[in-house]
Image (cartoon, helix red, strand yellow):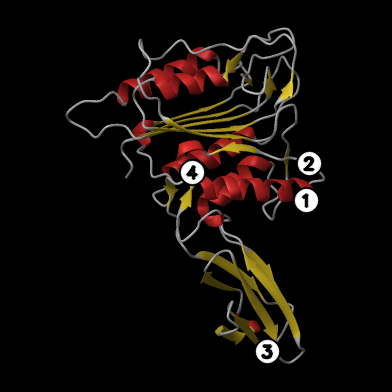
Amino acid sequence: MADNDYALVVGVDHYPAYGENLDGAITDAEAVRDWLLDKKGGDVDPANLRYIPSEARPPAPIQDQIDDALQELLIAAKPNKSKKDARRMYFYFSGHGMAVSSEELALCLAKWSKDRRGAALDSLAYRTMLRDAGRFKEVVVWLDCCRVREVGLRAQEPEVGAAVPAERGADLFVGYATTFQDAAFEAATGEDKVVRGHFTRALIAGLKGGAQVNGRVTGASLKEYLDREIPVIAKAASHEQQPEVNAGRLAQVVLCSPDRVTLVKFDLSGHTGRIVLEGPDLEVIWEGDASEGPFELELAPSKMYLLSHPESGDELAVRVRPGKEVPYVRF
């Protein structure tokens, strides 16, 4: 267990005063929380994670709740002789976002509206505080929200932090869902048909193996995966979205080492008789009678496979994409 890692996860669906609720922010936050706690994922000690979903009545979270959670984590991460020094801090937010500048992004909390423009967190100030707090060696920031520019914002700086900034700040990984002045989207794409943000859908898939190189997901490989996959996911929902990701000094740092196999479920009910599955090198790795299915097989991700029905000559190329609980193939 990574008992010297810490995390704050926030998902805001409810904006009663703004009048534009979201459908997938809490679902996305739950997915990130679950990955962080998963022993095959972030493996964060549950005691070191704070999860804050929004509520409509009364509108929450407010800044005090965020700062209280961060204060608890900063205290818990304070160096002492009885435990390992803190290593990594994860900060995740999904919800509405409004850009003040290319660097400053206002993370809108539940009370935010056109009339309450200050009910938002200054993401630059928060990440700077975490970087300079002297607690963490690495800070990973994932922000799944729009960066459309809004005039007259007054995003709030954190009320917690170190009295004196550390001499050398933590190494930063910063992932924005979209580029400056552009929108981020959510949609019910994929086989699960659940509304998710395009950024977080790709993020979780990448962390679960899509971004792995030689069995490891590094800052650089995750950036490359997000840059490549988010536009594809967005296009499937008739959107355009390009993330902005800076791996910084965490480019070569291993973020996680996911399993190198993916469980795939095959529904072969479209055929009868013998079915053959060939691997990337055209070797037969499985064969059986279609009528005995469906079948579940563990396969290496990010590779191509070929299903064939010798009797009819039908073939289906299958690319196994990691990150789904049980990818489903119908033949």
> Exactly how many numbered labels are in the figure?
4
Which is nearer the N-term, disc 3 or disc 2?
2
Circles 3 and 4: CB atoms closer than 8 Å: no
Q: Quadrant of the N terminus?
A: top left
Judged from the image, the secondary structure of the residue bearing numbered disc 1 is helix
> Is disc 4 surrounded by few (<14), some (14 to 19) or many (20+) residues within 10 Å?
some
Which label number is shown at residue 240? 2
Q: Quadrant of the C terminus?
A: bottom right
Judged from the image, the secondary structure of the residue bearing numbered disc 2 is loop
Which is nearer the N-term, disc 4 or disc 2?
2
Which is nearer the N-term, disc 1 or disc 3?
1
Farthest-out residue, bottom: 311
Circles 2 and 1: CB atoms closer than 8 Å: no
Which label number is shown at residue 47? none
Q: CA distance from mark 3 to mark 2?
A: 44 Å
Left/right placement of residue 318 relative to residue 299 reads right
Which label number is shown at residue 273? 3
Identify the residue at horizontal 53%, vertical 65% (top origin): 263
Left/right placement of residue 60 relative to residue 271 reads left
Left/right placement of residue 3 relative to residue 38 reads left
> Is disc 2 surrounded by few (<14), some (14 to 19) or many (20+) residues within 10 Å?
some
Which is nearer the N-term, disc 3 or disc 4?
4
- Image-quadrant location for residue 305: bottom right
Amino acid type indicated by mark 3:
Gly
Between residues 166 and 59, which one lies in front from this camera angle? Answer: 166
Amino acid type indicated by mark 2:
Glu
> Is disc 1 surrounded by few (<14), some (14 to 19) or many (20+) residues within 10 Å?
few
Residue 58 appears in view = no
Amino acid type indicated by mark 4:
Ala
Which label number is shown at residue 236? 1
Q: CA distance from mark 3 to mark 4?
A: 49 Å
Circles 1 and 3: CB atoms closer than 8 Å: no
